[in-house]
Image (tube, grey):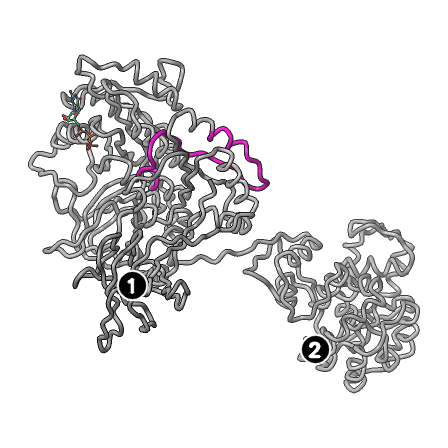
């Protein structure tokens, strides 16, 4: 007889390699794996064991005396409900014999094959005693849960002593599960071929033990055992978390992937991962760059935009009457460039605040006769925060006072170093007024765009961003969209922000009706059910029904969200957000009275070290906190720190509207302390009461339905509509509550100052008398100064 490998022999006798390896183990013949060679002598022994197994159709089992781990097949055939039921209860008992159970696991999976194919030899008494003994089995199953798992030796004896003995304790408790699951199997099961393990399994959120077993092609009992060995007690229906799933799969060398279900109503997904059906952009082609022009007031942004449009748009587009739709497209050297024609960074940042990144490139206009100004710096920081490349257009070069070197010098301090000086920022001297240098500027735009490798696929359904939108008397809702990917067609079912519809008509920047618009093209569309907002995303869907569903769902969500305030970072919630892992970087904007203080503060703030969060200063400046600071803060989720400066009125209003946190200080170390404490979660908002004024009650009037009106005279400070009030009678507080109405003569007043008369009513209090003093107060947050 020639030498034969394990797997070859297994094939020959119609068994799995594992069976053979086990059998060899029982015979005390050592083999390492299925490739191991079996010597002829052993083969003969094996033959004795396996010979004629194909004739065996009785369902009896090959039992060896020392193979007590394989005692189970004899018990398995017809189903046993109790056995299954008991599985859970009995699982803990495995602890008595965890080792045995684990070792046995491998054998057990192959048992059915033994059962069907093997002729019984010296150990087949087990099987022989139970032809189709359902009764026995039921009992066995019931008892499995209540009996202790035997030690190996015991098991072997019990196996030999027949089904009954085994039923009382000869099987591992978890086997009940198998029995439960197999109750519909025929008494003589077909040969079981072990399923190959999958390479990878996927799951969503969690899997039950049963589901995991199914995915792995294993018996649940095997998984339960593995879990047990890992210290986890589980039942078949128990849900496993990601860690447990990964642990088990690692044991089998199977890869795990957690499925992330996509929220189809989130339009952002169509931008980040456009993996929606066939909508994956594959035919990527070059697309025109989208350019925003920014710069300080009066440095020539509008003039430049007009100059470019006038010189370029009309060329080759004779007859077109440019119309303002928020963006326009030109052609330079055969290539298109799209300009957003709302100059200034407000529009730019508003878009970014809404999560839309549409600008590929920024032209920073700096007047050569004026140099770098506060808004120039703001623009730089806005562009940097959005990671958009900057080309500097040094404007007004026609002026005799033009000093481009100064501009270059000053911009160096802000990280923009000209190529001439060894940096990588492109500077182009221009005169927007005279149209000089425009060609070079556009050439540079194309160059930077080329480096940026801007690509899009015009064959997919369109998606992009709203540049402007308004309600037009004649047209209804009209929105200028910038197509960022794909092609937009008339008739397309579209979701725009929280509204939807079908594109009824499209008008280009030249005022022409068009049927389609490709990547980077701005078009004005009509046909939406409502007016979207600038910065909203739009996505075209395959049919109107989907668009309507998603649009309506988004409108519903938006309504709900309106009620829930946006959670901007404030020092008070900073720690919570850090804890929730939402923040890794704390963005700060630092404004101070003098540049020296700005630098000192920025330097100290950068030194703060708190684990898990970095301080990033995204903008600094000397001077009052202005609206632009707030919009940058809102877009970048930053906190504004004012050192010896205050926000101006517009900034205050904007900060309130946007929920931007402004912290005002007069001592540097207090600023540092406050930020540090907030990062460590130590900051509690503190409030104190501040009395703002007193009014004396001179007369009272009782008016039905209104109650008592107190005719008062403000004797100190002022009374405001929002203040809390206390009623003092002979210096004793007799009531504390809220103002209801505050009137000057017949009109509602916001506040009434000292020396004036007013009428006051107090909520839920009518017992006002002449001579009472109404004290007004407000609760003020204590600024940590
Ligand atoms: N001499 C000269 N004047 C220019 C040039 N560009 C713009 N100007 C003038 O500078 C002034 C301001 O120009 P705008 O284009 O309105 O400046 P802007 O940056 O758009 O200003 P805001 O819209 O207020 O932010 C106007 O009087 C322009 O005529 C130029 O290249 N040369």
* 366 horizontally vs 169: left or right: left
Write the start and end of the magenta stretch as one range.
601-630
Residue tagged 1 = 548
Disc 2 secondary structure class: helix
- Residue 376 is one of the magenta-drawn residues: no
Total labels drawn: 2
Foreground of the two, 591 or 11: 591
Q: Decide: few, some or many residues near mark 1? Use Cα within 10 Å; few <14, some 14-19, many ≥20.
A: some
Q: Nearer the viewer, residue 108 or 622?
A: 622
Q: Residue at x 17, y 19 (%)?
A: 436
Residue 757: image x %, image y %? 22, 58
Q: Which mark is residue 86?
A: none
- Residue nearest the observer in this picture, 405 or 264: 405
- Rendering coords of residue 18 (x, y %): 78, 59
Q: Quadrant of residue 225?
A: bottom right
Assess whether mark 1 and mark 2 are in contact (beta carbons under 8 angstroms): no
Q: Is residue 757 above or below residue 53?
A: above
Can you identify the residue that label 2 sits on?
Answer: 180
- Please, what secondary structure does the residue beneath circle 1 have? helix
**Residue 24: quadrant of the picture:** bottom right
Across and down, in percent, residue 384 comes to 38, 32
The x, y position of residue 214, in whole percent, is 63, 65
Quadrant location of ligand 1?
Answer: top left
Q: Is residue 451 visible?
A: yes
Identify the residue at horizontal 70%, vertical 82% (top origin). Answer: 81
Q: For ligand 1, tell me if the residue under mark 2 lies within 8 Å.
A: no
C-alpha distance separating marks 2 and 1 = 48 Å
């Amino acid at each position: 007889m020639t030498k034969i490998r394990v797997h070859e022999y297994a094939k020959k006798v119609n068994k799995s390699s594992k069976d053979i390896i086990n059998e060899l183990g029982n015979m005390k013949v050592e083999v390492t794996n299925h490739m191991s060679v079996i010597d002829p002598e052993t083969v003969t022994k094996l033959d004795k064991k396996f010979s004629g197994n194909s004739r065996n159709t009785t369902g009896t089992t090959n039992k060896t005396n020392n193979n007590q781990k394989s005692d189970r097949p004899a018990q398995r055939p017809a189903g046993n409900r109790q056995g299954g039921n008991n599985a859970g209860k009995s699982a803990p008992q495995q602890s008595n014999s965890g080792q045995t159970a684990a070792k046995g696991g491998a054998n057990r999976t192959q048992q059915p094959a033994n059962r069907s194919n093997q002729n019984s030899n010296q150990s087949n008494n087990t099987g022989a005693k139970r032809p189709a003994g359902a009764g026995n089995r039921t009992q066995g199953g019931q008892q499995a849960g209540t009996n202790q798992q035997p030690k190996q030796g015991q098991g072997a004896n019990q196996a030999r002593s027949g089904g009954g003995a085994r039923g009382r304790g000869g099987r591992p408790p978890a086997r009940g599960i198998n029995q439960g699951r197999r109750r519909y199997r025929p008494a003589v099961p077909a040969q079981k071929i072990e399923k190959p393990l999958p390479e990878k399994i996927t799951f969503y959120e969690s899997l039950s033990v049963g589901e995991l077993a199914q995915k792995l092609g294993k018996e649940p009992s095997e998984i339960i055992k593995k879990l047990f060995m890992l210290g986890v007690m589980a039942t078949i229906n128990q849900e496993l978390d990601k860690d447990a799933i990964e642990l088990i799969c690692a044991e089998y060398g199977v890869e795990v992937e957690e499925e992330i279900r996509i929220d189809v109503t989130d339009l952002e997904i169509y931008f980040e991962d456009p993996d929606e059906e066939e909508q994956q952009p594959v035919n990527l082609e070059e697309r025109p760059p989208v350019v925003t022009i920014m710069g300080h007031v009066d440095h020539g942004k509008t003039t430049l935009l007009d100059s470019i449009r006038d010189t370029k748009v009309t060329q080759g587009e004779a007859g077109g009457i440019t119309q303002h739709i928020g963006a326009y497209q030109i052609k330079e050297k055969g290539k298109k460039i799209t300009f957003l024609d709302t100059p200034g960074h407000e529009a730019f940042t508003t878009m970014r605040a809404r999560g839309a990144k549409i600008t590929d490139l920024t032209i920073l206009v700096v007047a050569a006769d004026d140099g770098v100004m506060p808004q120039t710096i703001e623009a730089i920081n806005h562009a940097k925060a959005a990671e958009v490349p900057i080309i500097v257009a040094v404007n007004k070069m026609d002026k005799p006072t033009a000093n481009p070197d100064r501009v270059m010098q000053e911009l160096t301090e802000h990280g923009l170093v000209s190529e001439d000086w060894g940096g990588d920022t492109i500077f182009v001297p221009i005169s927007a007024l005279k149209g000089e240098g425009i060609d070079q500027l556009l050439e540079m735009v194309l160059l930077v765009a080329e480096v940026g490798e801007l690509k899009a696929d015009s064959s997919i359904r369109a998606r992009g961003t709203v540049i402007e939108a308004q309600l037009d008397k004649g047209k209804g809702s009209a929105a200028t969209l910038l197509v960022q990917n794909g092609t937009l067609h008339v008739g397309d079912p579209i979701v725009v922000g929280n509204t939807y519809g079908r594109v009824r008509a499209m008008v280009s920047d030249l005022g022409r009706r068009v049927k389609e618009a490709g990547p980077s093209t701005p078009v004005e569309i009509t046909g939406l059910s409502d007016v979207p907002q600038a910065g909203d995303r739009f996505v075209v869907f395959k049919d109107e029904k989907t668009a309507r569903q998603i649009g309506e769902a988004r409108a519903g969500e938006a309504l709900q969200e309106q009620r829930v305030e946006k959670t901007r970072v404030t020092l008070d919630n900073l720690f919570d957000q850090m804890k929730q892992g939402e923040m890794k970087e704390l963005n700060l904007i630092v404004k101070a009275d003098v540049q020296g203080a700005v630098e000192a503060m920025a330097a100290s703030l950068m030194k703060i070290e708190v684990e898990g969060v970095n301080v990033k200063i995204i903008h600094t400046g000397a001077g009052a906190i202005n609206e632009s600071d707030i919009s940058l803060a809102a877009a970048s989720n930053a906190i504004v720190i004012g050192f010896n400066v205050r926000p101006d009125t517009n900034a205050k209003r904007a900060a309130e509207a946007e929920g931007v946190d402004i912290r005002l200080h007069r001592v540097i170390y207090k600023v540092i302390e406050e930020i540090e404490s907030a990062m460590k979660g130590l900051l509690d908002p503190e409030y104190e009461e501040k009395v703002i004024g007193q009014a004396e009650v001179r007369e009272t009037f009782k008016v039905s339905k209104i109650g008592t009106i107190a005719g008062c005279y403000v004797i100190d400070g002022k009374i405001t509509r929002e203040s809390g009030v206390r009623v003092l009678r002979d210096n004793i507080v007799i009531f504390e509550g809220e103002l209801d109405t505050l009137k000057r003569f017949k009109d509602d007043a916001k506040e009434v100052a000292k020396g004036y008369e007013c009428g006051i009513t107090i909520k839920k209090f009518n017992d006002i008398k002449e001579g009472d003093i109404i004290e007004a107060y407000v609760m003020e947050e204590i600024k940590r100064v």
